[in-house]
Image (cartoon, grey):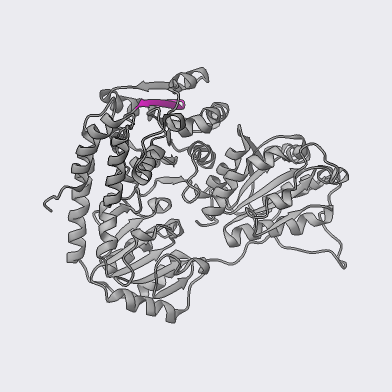
Amino acid sequence: MSVDSDDGWVPTAPWSLPRNATVADHITQRMACWGVRRYFGFPGDAINGMTSAVQRTNELAQFIQVRHEETAGFAASAHVKYGGGPLGCVLVTSGPGAIHVLNGLYDAKLDHQPVVALVGHTALTAEGGGYYQEVDLLALYKDVAAAFLAKLDHPAQVRHLVDRACRTALARRTVTALILPLDVQDKPAVPDPPHAHGYYQTSSVPGSGPTIPPETDVRRAAEVLRGGERVAMLVGQGALGAETEVREVARRLGAGVATALLGFTVVDHREPWVTGAIGLLGTRPSWQLMQECDRLLIVGSNLPYSEFYPPPGRARAVQIDRDGTLLGLRYPTEVNLTGDAAPTLRALLHELGPGPGPTRWRETLSRKVASWRQSQRELAEQPADPINPQMIFTHLNERLPDDVLLAVDCGTTTAWYARHVQVRPGMLASMSGTLLSMGGAMPYGIAAKFAHPDRPLVALIGDGAMQMNGVNELITVAKYWRGWTDPRFVVLVLNNRDLAFVSWEQRSSEGTPMFPDSQQLPDIAYHRWAEVLGLRGELVDSPDQVPGAWERALSADCPTVINALVDPAEMMLPPHFTPEQVRNTAMAVLRGDTDWAGIVRRGLPATLSTYRPRRG
């Protein structure tokens, strides 16, 4: 994603420091030089100096108070993903706060989002004495902030530590961290270190623009791709910002395009040559695209499921990624291009020439895509007990505003989103893509609304994730929503009283029944909780209520929670169902799965709808 954002890029100091400025004031000002004006966190005594400094900016910097530090980490990651600024930033206290935030920071690290963690710490004078909340933060953060991690011990370090933390996070698309002892935060600032031995004079100017690989390598890539009769493209989040170039390269090559979940918004999913998601939750046309292609172009994707790539030796492959260490990692590529997606694809277009025009390969793909989409619509319309969750997503898809923000949680909601929501240009959508952590959608939604307060948001959440942190972060929504220009913040809760994704994994991979003690969830009136907080709530427990619920929520004048009672037996069939998975699921039924009747009731029609041959 580009460093450009709605907040703008500010390479110089946005405000002057007063004569009595503290180290915390200096940190806040210097972070603003790098475009950081928003801090996600929760207060505590070890960051009192920092929160006081944010307060003294008179709203030039903003502290977003969430309910838990883990949310702060997720929100900082999402802040960048949704274009809220070039850098995400968390501000959390020592000990428990520093520990809590780690899961959200790992989400940023694994999804390659630049985030700086500012973490409070025990006063220097008390370090090593077993003080309250004293944790070895340098050891704790050694992995998540491996690219750059430092402790601020002296006021003269502020400039070079902040500059290096921000520059490293941006350059390497990762997490960096600064440990801030409490007593140092309140010391007098040293905004201009002396020009002397042992001091540094650093710059807050960002690095150079996009990179393009050498012309000879681009020409070799074009030669490989031009020779293909059945070309496939796989695009991921590294292709964000290169939507026009991806479309034109696909047209020139007569290619079909599959997407990783984080790359969903790169293409228009209504197009007949877009096969949709790839992987366990992907589509059958994406599986067929990869199995039948003779050329493969991977753009900005690091999808780790190797079984969903073409069989080795079947396709000649080219890969584009700005991180050279990721090239050739998932498939034996023939040409590897280290560069940013948009300029590299433009260079490739120059070498490709006019292209073949309409091809038989694209016509074949279009028939397969149309057949798949029809089968999925039929599957969503099948009756269930009480509601087919897939039907809820098809009705949402028909009503999505053109400028909607989508925040997706991990679980069955991911599957139905991937199968039924046709993301199109103008929309923004994201999720915890590599960490695959439950509990990401509500923090993502909150960050997205702060990035774009004038756009509607829909958060798609399972009841497990809602109970994990959603019910608490709904308080955050209630705290801030009146400050958003567009008040629409719609939370769909798929309430099936089951950690259904885990239940299906256990059945298909282990051959063991659903374990109620582990997977059953309490039935909570989520809509009533919304009403307690002064928001709108809707209970949806029959199919005929679904269309009206979406229409009311998407036109409401305040946030809405839709508590949808859905069938836990609705099957998530992968695009390629192996005999072993069939045997294991059957064994789970024979061993007394508590929902054996539901599996039989929904399994046969789902299998027939997904896999039966169709005339194209």
Among all residues in the image, which is located at the extreme front? 591
Residue 201: image quadrant is bottom right
Question: Residue 135 at what x, y percent from top left?
Answer: 75, 44
Range of the magenta residues? 556-565
Among all residues in the image, which is located at the extreme left? 615
| Residue 490 in view (yes/no) | no
Chief SS of the magenta region: strand
Residue 447: image quadrant is top right
Question: Residue 584 at what x, y percent from top left?
Answer: 31, 44
Foreground residue, 517 or 361? 517
Q: Is residue 522 left or right of residue 447?
A: left
Residue at the spot 29% in from the left edge and 70% down from the top edge: 314
Check if residue 559 falls in the magenta segment: yes
| Residue 483 in view (yes/no) | yes
Residue at the spot 45% in from the left edge and 66% down from the top edge: 329
Check if residue 568 falls in the magenta segment: no
Q: As displayed, is residue 117 above or below residue 563? A: below
Question: Residue 377 at what x, y percent from top left?
Answer: 22, 40
